[in-house]
Image: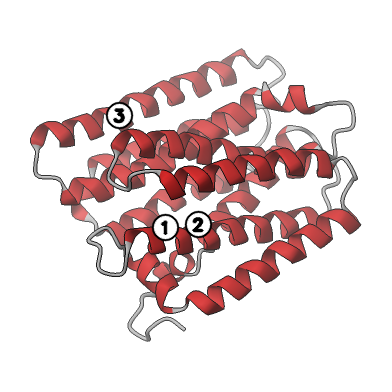
């Protein structure tokens, strides 16, 4: 269990529950945007458990690769290392439960998507295993794949309930692409902020800043254009949520010196959840 002095706001991050919360929140927004009138609770549970398992194993692997004495270890890594056996068992149970729920209670079409998602996840773990932990280029490639896998898995959980649409429709959907970009920038932001605390070279810091600021501005502009071009206004809340998420990440980025690394991770996740809370209950004609 976490130490009694551990603040409550840090617990979701330490327990790897932050990413499942983000996935479940955006699953609801995907369902509302794509007008899936009935999305069973099992879809939310299966997605949450699957994402939880992936993040548990990712943090266990990441902590193992960095080493117990590494200066790259953060609070989440140290906590997972301290309780690695419990996390390993929990991750296995979560993964198996998600698989059983998907097989028993979800459309059979989910299997075809799950195979692709599983292969992409394996590629991600392979990149994590063989990449240089201090290489900025490797981190960007891994973050891009992580964002794609996260968005794909979240969208699939509702896409399987749209029988008239196939895999190609999903892969080229504006919603999934924009959400994938937002997820990628969320992960990249955390990397940039963590490296910023360890970097003394002003040019390196400026390069990291630029690699985050420009894509956030571009994503916000793209989301705004998509929202304005939607004459039926059915997808506007979704793209406004993307725009708001990008804007919040940029605000946090400009104020990052005021917060600890752990606080920044929590704020980055909040930047993805808050827009859903704001726009998921709003009128589609916003």
Secondary structure type for disc 1: helix
Marks 2 and 1, how far apart in space? 6 Å
Q: Judge the density around disc 2: few (<14), some (14-19), many (≥20) Cα neighbours within 10 Å.
A: some
Marks 2 and 3, how far apart in space? 24 Å
In front: label 3 or label 1: 1
Secondary structure type for disc 2: helix
Q: Nearer the viewer, residue 95 or 10?
A: 95
- Residue 1 in the image: above or below residue 40: below
Q: Position of residue 129 (x, y in %)?
A: 45, 50
The residue indicated by pointer 2 is 58
Instruction: Name the residue: 57% across, 71% down.
Output: 88
In the rendered structure, find residue 211 and report the number of the disc placed on it: 3
Q: Quadrant of residue 199?
A: top left
- Earlier-in-chain disc, 3 versus 1: 1
Whether the residues at callouts 2 and 1 have beta carbons within 8 Å, the answer is yes
Q: Is residue 23 left or right of residue 106?
A: left
Marks 3 and 1, how far apart in space? 23 Å
């Amino acid at each position: 269990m976490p130490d009694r002095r551990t603040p409550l706001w840090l617990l979701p991050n330490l327990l790897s529950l932050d990413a499942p919360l983000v996935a479940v929140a955006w699953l609801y927004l995907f369902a509302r945007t794509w007008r899936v009138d009935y999305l069973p609770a099992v879809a939310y549970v299966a997605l949450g458990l699957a994402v939880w398992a992936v993040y548990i194993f990712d943090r266990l692997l990441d902590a193992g690769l960095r080493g117990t004495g590494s200066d790259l270890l953060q609070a989440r890594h140290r906590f997972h290392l301290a309780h690695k056996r419990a996390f390993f068992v929990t991750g296995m149970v979560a993964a198996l439960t998600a698989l059983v729920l998907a097989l028993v209670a979800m459309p059979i079409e989910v299997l075809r998507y799950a195979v692709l998602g599983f292969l992409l996840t394996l590629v991600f773990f392979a990149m994590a295993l063989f990449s240089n932990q201090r290489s900025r280029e490797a981190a960007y490639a891994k973050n891009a794949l992580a964002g794609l896998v996260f968005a794909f898995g979240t969208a699939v959980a509702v896409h399987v309930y749209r029988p008239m649409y196939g895999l190609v429709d999903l892969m080229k959907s504006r919603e999934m692409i924009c959400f994938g970009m937002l997820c990628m920038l969320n992960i990249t932001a955390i990397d940039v902020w963590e490296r910023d605390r360890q970097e003394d070279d002003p040019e390196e810091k400026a390069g990291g800043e630029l690699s985050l600021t420009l894509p956030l501005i571009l994503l916000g502009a793209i989301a705004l254009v998509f929202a304005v071009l939607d004459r039926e206004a059915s997808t506007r809340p979704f793209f406004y949520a993307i725009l708001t998420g990008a804007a919040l990440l940029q605000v946090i980025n400009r104020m990052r010196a005021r917060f600890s690394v752990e606080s920044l991770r929590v704020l980055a996740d909040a930047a993805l959840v808050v827009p859903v809370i704001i726009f998921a209950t709003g009128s589609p004609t916003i």
